[in-house]
Image (cartoon, rainbow, N blue to C red):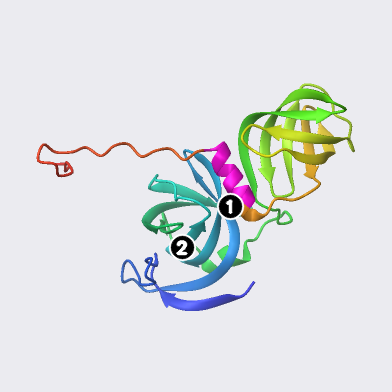
Amino acid sequence: MEAHALQDDAAIGPDGCSAERRSARRSSLMFRAAKLLCESGEYVCIIRDVSATGTRLRLFHAVPHEPHLFLELPSGERFAMERVWQRDDQAGFRFSCSIDVAEFIREPSPFARRPIRLRLQRSALVATGGVHRPVVLRDISQHGAAIDADGPIPVGQTLRLEIDGLPSRFGCVRWRRDAGHGLVFQQAYTLDELAMHALTLQPLAQPAPADVAPDGDLARCA
């Protein structure tokens, strides 16, 4: 993926201008998928650009209201961040400490790069041969899911995964370890479908009401 060096600041504002006039080398990383982690759960995001001090992300839905979040790359590396601005489905974040942009782009890992997997725990059902059995959904990606079942499901078994609030999906068992089973979907989700399913399974927490002073102005801390 092409990376184009730009001269900019830690967190680019929604109008393309720097939020703080600090010089930082920024590279445009168009459409690199990652995960945004917060109290509500894990959400799909797209890294639009990054510098040593911050990044601009695009989401497929509203931005979580929490000011402090983590960005997780497909390699599993995490970066603590603070939200600086947001507009519609995009937001700018400042890293808690400076990063090595070249390493961030290269994303080194001893493991092969894997598609984004969203870790969660939800009750679900699998249907095989007209029989439904309860399972626990452990993670989900564009191409498959991991579930825990109370008994073995044969490797190669075709089944239908039913998750409350989502359309059912056909797949087959690719691997099994103890209670854990890995499923491969017959039809993959698009990235935006996965993002919206994640939101359905993990609704964003609502911000706490702001304290209001008697005169109607927002209360200020002393």
Image location of residue 156, percent across then percent down: 90, 38
Image quadrant assignment for residue 213: top left
Assess whether residue 195 is covered by the magenta stretch: yes
Q: Is residue 9 above or below residue 136?
A: below
Indicate the quadrant containing the N terminus: top left, top right, bottom left or bottom right: bottom right
Secondary structure under badge 1?
loop
Secondary structure under badge 2?
strand
Looking at the image, tell me whether mark 2 or mark 1 is earlier in sequence order.
2
Residue at the disc numbered 2: 56
The magenta-colored residue range is 193-202
Indicate the quadrant containing the C terminus: top left, top right, bottom left or bottom right: top left
Q: Which mark is residue 77?
A: 1
Image location of residue 191, percent across then percent down: 64, 54
Instruction: Name the amino acid, label 1.
Output: Glu
For label 1, the crowd category at 10 Å Cα-Cα, with few meaning under 14, some 14 to 19 and many 20 or more, is: few
Instruction: Name the amino acid, label 2.
Output: Arg
Q: Is residue 16 above or below residue 60?
A: below
Assess whether residue 178 is covered by the magenta stretch: no
Nearer to me, 97 or 51: 51
Q: Is residue 134 left or right of residue 120?
A: right
